[in-house]
Amino acid sequence: MLRTMTRTGLLVLLGSLVAVPASAQIVQGLHFGGGWFIPRGLDSRVPGDVLVENLNSLTFNKSDFNSGQLFGEWLVEFGDHIEAGAGVGFYKGSAPSFYTDYQDSSNNFANIEQTLSLRVVPISGFVRFLPFGRPSTVQPYFGVGVSALNYRYVEEGNFIDFSDNTIFPATYVATGTAVGPLAIIGLRVPIKGDIWAFTTEWRHQWGSGDTGGAAAGFLNNKIDLGGSNISFGFMMRF
């Protein structure tokens, strides 16, 4: 299903650009801002997700991964109602964790603790459609696109070797890039004309990366990179 959505996003992106009239006025713009990223819930993550599997032995709050995000985009407008763009973002979230059913008997039965962290840098191409209004008026919009999600997932701290019941420090790292579709809904509010504008936007990204599974020290072989961005931005047209 994810591959189908990605192909559909690419086809819409390319088809929209091909369909733009040659006579349309072309205006460029810069769009940047930040907001909040909320990873997908535990009940909707991809099969084989390592965070879901970790909950069988570790205690942590998935909501700790909710964290701030930043973005910057370059836009090309074709008339008043369609624009293409490319951008990059940054998100990093982490959660403290500990073994649910085991303590360190050599250290006053203290919790055996770790830190789970995820960094995602999405590099996106997209098309936005603005069906109503003009750049000098309030314009709602929606869009579709495709993102290359560069990720780094880390589990760092103390772990148990159940073969001999010893505790050891370790750092496990998974990196890579996954590709997935992108959906966008937003609102653009101009500031005394059509050059400057504020934006508020919701977008959702899909995608999952490989951890390497047990061979790399992880309890499962996938990390879901999907989630929703709620952001506020500032736009300049030129």
Image (tube, helix red, strand yellow):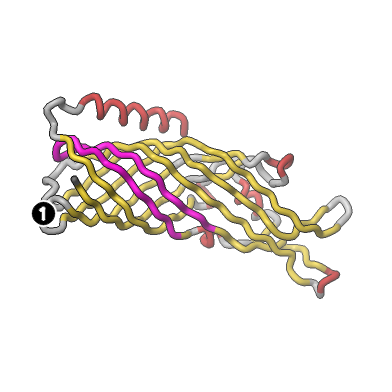
For the point 48% across and 52% down, the residue is 39
The secondary structure making up most of the magenta span is strand
* Secondary structure type for disc 1: loop
Query: Residue 161 location in percent, x, y?
Result: 82, 53
Check disc 1: other Cα within 10 Å, few if <14, some if 14-19, many if 20+: few
Q: Which residue is mark 1?
A: 193
Does residue 153 show up magenta in the picture?
no
**Quadrant location of residue 117?**
bottom right
User: Is residue 42 depicted above or below 95 in this figure?
Assistant: above
For the point 11% across and 27% down, the residue is 23
Depth check: 101 or 110 in front?
110
Residue 181 horizontal side relative to residue 167, left or right: left
Query: Residue 197 location in percent, x, y?
Result: 20, 54
- Residue at the far right: name it: 164
Does residue 88 show up magenta in the picture?
yes
Residue 123 horizontal side relative to residue 141, left or right: right
Which residues make up the magenta segment? 68-93
**Tally of numbered discs:** 1
Depth check: 218 or 196 in front?
196
- Residue at the far front: name it: 238
Depth check: 43 or 46 in front?
46
For the point 68% across and 58% down, the residue is 58
Residue 80 horizontal side relative to residue 129, left or right: left
User: Is residue 48 depicted above or below 104 in this figure?
Assistant: above
The C terminus appears in which quarter of the rendering?
top left
Under mark 1, the amino acid is Gly
For the point 68% across and 41% down, the residue is 213
